[in-house]
Amino acid sequence: MNRLGVRNPRGLAAFAVVAGGMVTMAGAGVSGAGGVFVGAGAVGVAGDLALQRCAPGLMGRLGRLHIGETLRFELRCVLLLLLLGRIHVTGPIGLASAMALVLCLLGGQALHAAICTLIRRRRRLAVAARHIDLRRLGISDRPPRRLTEWPGLRMLAYEVSALAGLGATLVTGDARWVVAGLTLAAGGCLVTVLALLPYLVRSLRLPGPARVLAEVNAWLGRHRPETVLYFSGPRESAYQVGMWLETLAALRAPALVILRERHLLEGLAPTALPVLCVPAATHLRRLDLGSVRVALYPANVGENIHLLRVPTMQHVFLGDGDTTAGVDPYSKVYDQVWVAGRAGRQRYAEAAVGVEDADIVEVGRPQLDGVRVREDDDRAPAAIPTVLLTAGDEPLVRRLLESEPPVRVLYWPHPAAGGRRSAAHRRIVAAIGAANERRAGREADEPEEVRALRAEAARCRTELTRRIAAHQARLRRAHADEAMLTRDSAAADPAPPEEARELSEQWHRAHWAASPPWSHQIIEADVTNSPALHSCFDQADLLIGDPSGVVSDFIATLKPYALVDTAGLGAQEFRRRHTVARAAYLLGPEDAGVDDLLRLLFDPAGDTLRAARHELRAYLLGPSTPPSIQRFDEAVDALAAKGEALNRLRELQTIREGAPDEHQPAAPCSCAPSAPPPAK
């Protein structure tokens, strides 16, 4: 039953009510018990409504098992005809009328579903876009949601009408009531079908792939992007393209984002960059990308080959070369591999996957340019230091929560680890909640003005949360489909990304100002209005975690950090396996060394790894000056110039290869000017 998605008790109860009502209606239809039939039908309608409201996941699974809402509606209609045939209250003419109306209702519902499907498919353009002017395509509005969505609610309304008419017939003995109820249901279905017809006609007039691609190519010809960020992947990998949007927007050369899946476009972070979503490889090949000189690839995926085949571009893999997972033999198909620092270069050399050292470029990590760096003279200990914990180690969490002197814990479970579904994670959350309750009395000891400032910050955070939600809703435009968003995005105000960034910065300032310095927090990476990880970096005095990209990023702050050697490898072997461990304090099995580590928070003079962190930061992320974004931009310009030179060389080579042999007569060329007459 778990695979049906009925672990939700309310969903299970609603499913049982629907199934029980259906069985009871079948029995009542066979036996001719009209009153029981009406009662069971009403209960079934209520159960179906509850099922749609509280268990939408189960509704989807039932549909995939071919027992969805449409089939249940059709079965109830058939059972109604069975009952009318058994109770003989309608007579032959009334029964025939009821049968005709039921057939009209079922046919109308099928026609409505077919029209909705056709409209939806016709409105799915060959290319979806953001911030690209395609208004000349004349894309029409989609049908109102009340006509195309919530089919289950409409069918339940038809059933209620039929059951009400049946109940009136059973009470009065007049067959006209059930015929009237069925007429009302069939008429309502007919009205929705007729209302959809104008939208169907408009959808049939929407431009086909050839015209859409021609308009996109016209835009490309006018704007001539020189750099492309190309990405393909599942929905959960959208963060990999999102992390490069600000970097791409900061380049001097005009840039373009190309996505291959529609779900990536739906989940893309706000950006003013032009974005194209091109699902079909045949359509991608027909795009005029002749102005593009540099193509950037954040991920090694099979769909990259569809752009890699273009010889006029220089292709760059944005490699996470400082981790073993980022080193792949496939990387040698690119013209260059860009890494953050010398660690990435050395990792490729050690892996010997065929990437030449000359093709590796160190560009830093532009995403970390805004991270606050702790200088050596900025080390006054906080009254209650903050520990950012990214390792889901339950005993370690309890040690931190019970620490004396006290510390504040920011618990950040990695979203890709899957640990948030575990029982250990739930126990950690419960322990943090209990620790906060024990510390709740501290607020009463604060001065009144401090509490007032914190309350004002909390009110500001609430208001900013509302504004962020409104901003996101405005961007999503729930009434608009993909075609309308493609049509209207060019006319949209290009300020939303800046507005979103400013709102986010204000929200984070308000959040930390409203949070008591002793209050532990659970940071959910993919939960709306939860602090961003880099914002937690600014708050933390120490990070404790496992070797990961999060730790590599934290090194940019130059703050102390510790890694957990859960396998008991020992310091020498652990540091040999993990580059990030070179400047880390190590915690052994059963969290040995935690007490010494926490004493470091209250006595910064005992921090013996400051120099090692400086060296490791330069090794992993490159020099701090010039900024990474400047180095990245210069790398793009240099590679674009190289690509342009190679293209000119190819053109010259083509001209030479196409030149006639001096011993052969030249063929006439209609596009070339005629030779001047010989001198006399």
Image: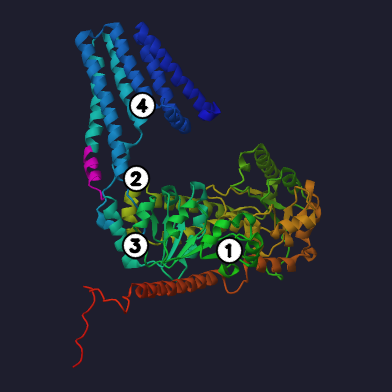
Q: Earlier in the sequence, mark 1 or mark 3?
A: 3
Query: Which SS class for mark 2?
Result: loop
Query: Which SS class for mark 3?
Result: loop
Q: Which mark is residue 288?
A: 3
Distance CA(mark 1)–CA(mark 4): 56 Å
Specify the amino acid type for callout 4. Answer: Thr
Residue carrying label 2: 479
Residue 199 pos. (x, y %): 24, 42
Query: Which SS class for mark 1?
Result: loop
Q: Quadrant of residue 381?
A: bottom right
Relative horizontal placement of residue 622, taking residue 397 as reference (left or right): left
Quadrant that contains the C terminus: bottom left
Residue 150 pos. (x, y %): 36, 34
Q: Earlier in the sequence, mark 4 or mark 3?
A: 4
Q: Which residue is at the far front?
A: 663
Which span of residues is magenta-colored?
197-207
